[in-house]
Image: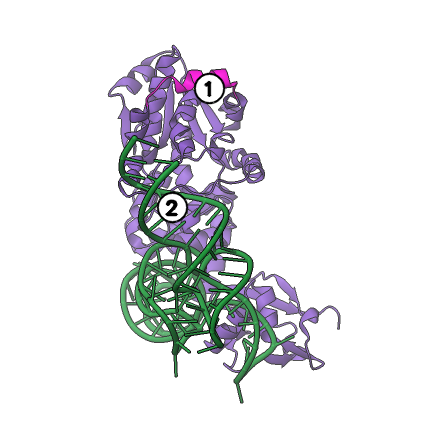
Chain colours: A purple, B green
RNA sequence: GGGGGAGUGUCCGAGUGGUUAAAGGAGACGGGCUGUAAACCCGUUGGCUCUGCCUACGCAGGUUCGAAUCCUGCCUCCCCCA
C-alpha cells in the first residue's frame, strides 16, 4: 500500500490518520476549493493529486466547491483583504471548477457538494455556530497577528471564515481534510467545530505550496506566475519551460511524485513539461506542444498554426495604406501607442524581418498573407478577404 | 462619541504652488546573452488623428497667471481613546 502521507507537511494529530486507515471503513476525505478565480492551476493540483491517491485506495473524496465561502474571503496567507468576486463570477467559476478537478479525480468516487447548500442557514443556526468559539481564538492565527501588528485591516467577515469552513466538515462528516500548508489553521479549527457538533474530529493533512513559474513566490493567479490546468498545450509547455532550474525538483516531486531525472537540465525540464501537458491534454499532447516550442523558441520560426487577422478594416487615411500601430493594437490587444513603441524598439517583425523603427504604415499588398510578429511569441497571419 | 492620520500611474512609494506625464522600486513588455531558461546587461512602460494634442495624482467645486501640492464640501480607509 502506498504511503498516503508522502510529500505531506503536517499530518495531525500524530498517528491518527494511521489509525483511521487501519479501520475497515472507507474514509471520507474532504477538500474545499473556493471558486474565486476562473481556473484551477497546478498549485491546486498538488492537493488534488493527493486526494486522488486516497481515492485510488478506495476512500471517498468529498470535493466542496466553496461558492458560499468565496463570498466571505479566506484570510489564509493573506497580508490584506482583497476585493471579493461578484456573485456572478463565483457562479461562473463554480460551474467549471469541478470539471477541471475531474482532470485529476475519479468522477465515480467523488462526491461534489457546494457549501451554499448548508451555509445559507437560518440566523438562529448561525448564532449557534458563532457560539462555538471566541474572538481570541479566531485572532490567534498568524496572518491576522501580522496584519493587526502592521495596522492593516482585518474584515469582520474574514474572521468568520474558519467557522464556516469548519462547518463544512460537520455537514459532510469528514474523516480527513486536506489542504495547503497555509490552510493549517482552518483545518485544525474544523476539528473543534466537529466536536462541538458531536462528531469525531477529522484528521488533517497539509501539502506544500507549489512555487510559481517565477521560482520564488507561491503560484497564484493574481501574481501571474501560474500554469492553469485549462491552458492550451503550447502555453502550458512554454510556461513550464520558463521555470527556473532550481524549481524543477519541487515540480517533479509535488506534481509527478518523481525525482528529477539525471542528465541535462534542459531535457529534464522538457520531460516535466511533456508529462504535465500529457496529463491535462491527453497522451501525445506534450510532444505536439514541444514541437511548437522548438519551432518558435529554439528555431525562432513561425508556428504551424497561427490565428488570422483581417486587415481590411485597418486601411487608413490614404487609400491602400494600412496603419501599423492600429493593426498591431487591434491584433494583439494593445494600445496603438504601445504598438508604436514596439516598432521603435525593433520588436515587430513581418515574416521574421524586423520592421524599420520609423515605419508606421504600409500598403496592404505588402502585408497580405504575411506573418506579423510581436516579440518572440506572438504571431498573427494577415489576410484580406475583402480584396 | 472624541482625537489623529491617509487616499498619487499595474502595484509599492517620493513629491506640499511653476521645465512634473509626475523621483525611486517592483512587475510587465522589447532587445542582448542563453538551454525559449534563471541570473545578468540595455531600453520602454497614460492615451491619441504623435515634431503636437488630450487625459491624469479619491470625488465635486473654489482660490491662482499657474495646483498632485492651498481652501470648502463629500466619499473611502486606518490608528488611538471612550
Q: How many marks?
A: 2
Q: Chain of mark 2?
A: A
Instruction: State the quadrant of the C terminus of chain A.
Output: bottom right
Whether residue A160 is in magenta: the answer is: no
Residue that label 1 marks: A126
Q: Residue at x 28, y 23 (%)?
A: A12
Q: Nearer the viewer, residue A12 or A267?
A: A12
Q: Which residue is mark 2?
A: A219
Residue A184 on image: x %, y %:
31, 30
In magenta, the rendered stretch is A121-134
Residue closest to the eye, A147 or A142: A147
Between A318 and A215, the one nearer to me in the picture: A318
Q: Given the image, what chain letter belongs to the residue carrying mark 1?
A: A
Q: Badge 1: few (under 14), some or many (20 or more) residues near its Cα, within 10 Å?
A: some
Element type where label 1 sits in the image: helix
Query: Residues at marks 2 and 1, common chain?
Result: yes
Residue A4, located in which quarter of the rendered image? top left
Whole-percent x, y for residue A178 in the image: 37, 28
The percent position of residue B25, horizontal first and vertical second, equals 31, 63
Amino acid at each position: 500500500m502506498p504511503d498516503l502521507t508522502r510529500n505531506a507537511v503536517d499530518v495531525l494529530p500524530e498517528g491518527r490518520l494511521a489509525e483511521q486507515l487501519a479501520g475497515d471503513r472507507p474514509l471520507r476525505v474532504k477538500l474545499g476549493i473556493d471558486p474565486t478565480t476562473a481556473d484551477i492551476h497546478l498549485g491546486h493540483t498538488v492537493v488534488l493529486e493527493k486526494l486522488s491517491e486516497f481515492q485510488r485506495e478506495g476512500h471517498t473524496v468529498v470535493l466542496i466547491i466553496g461558492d458560499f465561502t468565496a463570498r466571505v474571503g479566506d484570510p489564509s496567507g493573506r497580508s490584506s483583504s482583497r476585493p471579493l468576486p461578484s456573485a456572478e463570477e463565483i457562479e461562473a467559476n463554480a460551474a467549471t471548477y469541478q470539471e477541471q478537478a475531474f482532470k485529476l479525480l475519479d468522477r465515480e468516487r467523488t462526491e461534489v457538494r457546494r457549501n451554499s447548500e448548508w451555509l445559507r442557514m437560518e440566523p438562529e443556526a448561525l448564532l449557534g455556530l458563532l457560539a462555538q468559539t471566541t474572538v481570541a481564538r479566531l485572532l490567534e492565527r498568524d496572518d491576522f497577528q501580522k496584519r493587526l501588528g502592521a495596522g492593516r485591516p482585518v474584515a469582520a467577515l474574514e474572521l468568520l471564515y474558519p467557522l464556516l469552513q469548519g462547518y463544512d466538515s460537520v455537514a459532510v462528516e469528514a474523516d480527513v481534510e486536506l489542504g495547503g500548508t497555509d490552510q493549517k489553521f482552518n483545518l485544525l479549527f474544523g476539528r473543534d467545530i466537529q466536536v462541538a457538533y458531536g462528531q469525531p474530529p477529522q484528521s488533517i493533512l497539509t501539502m506544500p505550496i507549489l512555487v510559481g513559474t517565477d521560482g520564488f513566490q507561491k503560484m497564484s493567479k493574481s501574481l501571474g506566475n501560474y500554469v492553469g490546468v485549462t491552458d492550451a498545450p503550447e502555453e502550458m509547455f512554454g510556461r513550464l519551460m520558463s521555470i527556473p532550474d532550481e524549481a524543477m525538483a519541487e515540480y517533479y516531486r509535488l506534481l509527478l511524485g518523481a525525482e528529477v531525472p539525471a542528465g541535462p537540465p534542459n531535457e529534464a525540464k522538457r520531460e516535466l513539461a511533456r508529462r504535465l501537458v500529457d496529463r491535462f491534454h491527453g497522451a501525445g499532447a506534450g510532444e505536439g506542444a514541444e514541437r511548437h516550442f522548438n519551432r518558435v523558441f529554439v528555431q525562432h520560426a513561425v508556428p504551424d498554426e497561427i490565428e488570422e487577422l483581417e486587415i481590411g478594416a485597418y486601411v487608413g487615411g490614404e487609400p491602400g495604406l494600412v496603419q501599423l500601430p492600429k493593426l498591431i493594437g487591434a491584433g494583439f490587444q494593445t494600445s496603438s501607442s504601445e504598438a508604436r513603441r514596439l516598432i521603435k524598439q525593433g520588436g515587430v517583425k513581418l515574416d521574421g524581418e524586423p520592421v524599420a523603427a520609423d515605419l508606421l504604415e504600409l500598403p496592404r499588398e505588402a502585408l497580405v498573407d504575411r506573418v506579423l510578429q510581436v516579440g518572440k511569441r506572438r504571431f498573427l497571419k494577415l489576410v484580406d478577404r475583402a480584396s
